[in-house]
């Protein structure tokens, strides 16, 4: 079992930026692989007038794309920078990148753990 720290890097950004994010990840020396999801959510804003009333069928969700990368700690900064380069437009709603430590990563097919699993 490899004991190096493993992390999940999750970027949530504008869907039209996906191709640029993927290009940036593919340009990394050690391409880590990723998972992509279509997601919906809300940012910090509260809408017109600064008030927000929770009525499920009236909530204005924004469509976003989420990409998830599992990588060794030594690769985390490069993965974050790749997502930022690909996703950034400089406008409100560009998104967010979240980095979190993982307790354990196991490749199903081989049973490899840690860095060997990704």
Image (cartoon, helix red, strand yellow):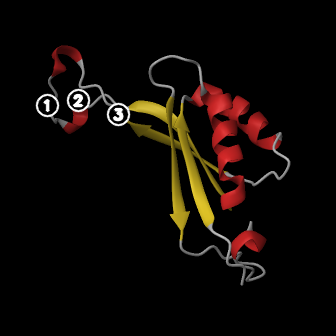
**How many angstroms separate mark 2 from mark 3 (CA)?**
13 Å
Determine which quarter of the picture holds residue 8: bottom right
Residue drawn at x 17%, y 35% is 55
Q: Name the residue under label 1.
A: 53
Residue 109 lies, with reference to residue 48, above or below; the image says below
Q: Mark 3 points at which residue?
A: 42
Residue 24 lies, with reference to residue 73, above or below; the image says above
Q: Mark 2 points at which residue?
A: 58
Residue drawn at x 71%, y 75% is 107
Q: Which mark is residue 9?
A: none
Q: Nearer the viewer, mark 1 or mark 2?
A: 1
Determine which quarter of the picture holds residue 41: top left
On the rendered image, what quadrant is the C terminus found in?
bottom right
Are the two marked residues, 1 and 2, in contact with CB atoms closer than 8 angstroms? yes
Residue 31 lies, with reference to residue 88, above or below; the image says below
Left or right: 43 with respect to 34? left
Callout 1 crowding tier (Cα within 10 Å): few <14, some 14–19, many ≥20:
few
Circle 2 sits in a helix, a strand or a loop, which is it?
Answer: helix
Left or right: 114 with respect to 15? right
On the rendered image, what quadrant is the N terminus found in?
bottom right
Residue drawn at x 69%, y 52% is 34
Callout 2 crowding tier (Cα within 10 Å): few <14, some 14–19, many ≥20:
few
> 105 or 35, which is in the foreground?
105
Circle 3 sits in a helix, a strand or a loop, which is it?
Answer: loop
Marked residue nearer the N-terminal end (2 or 3): 3
**How many angstroms separate mark 1 from mark 2 (CA)?**
9 Å
Left or right: 4 with respect to 47? right
Circle 1 sits in a helix, a strand or a loop, which is it?
Answer: loop
């Amino acid at each position: 079992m490899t004991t190096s720290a493993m992390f999940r890097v999750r970027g949530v950004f504008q869907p039209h930026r996906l191709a640029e994010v993927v290009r940036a990840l593919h340009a990394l020396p050690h391409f880590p692989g990723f998972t992509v999801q279509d997601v919906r959510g809300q940012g910090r804003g509260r809408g017109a007038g600064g008030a927000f009333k929770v009525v499920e069928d009236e909530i204005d969700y924004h469509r976003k794309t989420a990409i998830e990368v599992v990588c060794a700690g030594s690769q985390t900064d490069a993965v974050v920078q790749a997502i930022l380069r690909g996703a950034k437009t400089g406008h409100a709603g560009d998104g967010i990148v979240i980095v979190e430590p993982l307790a354990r990563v196991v490749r199903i097919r081989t049973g490899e753990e840690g860095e060997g699993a990704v």
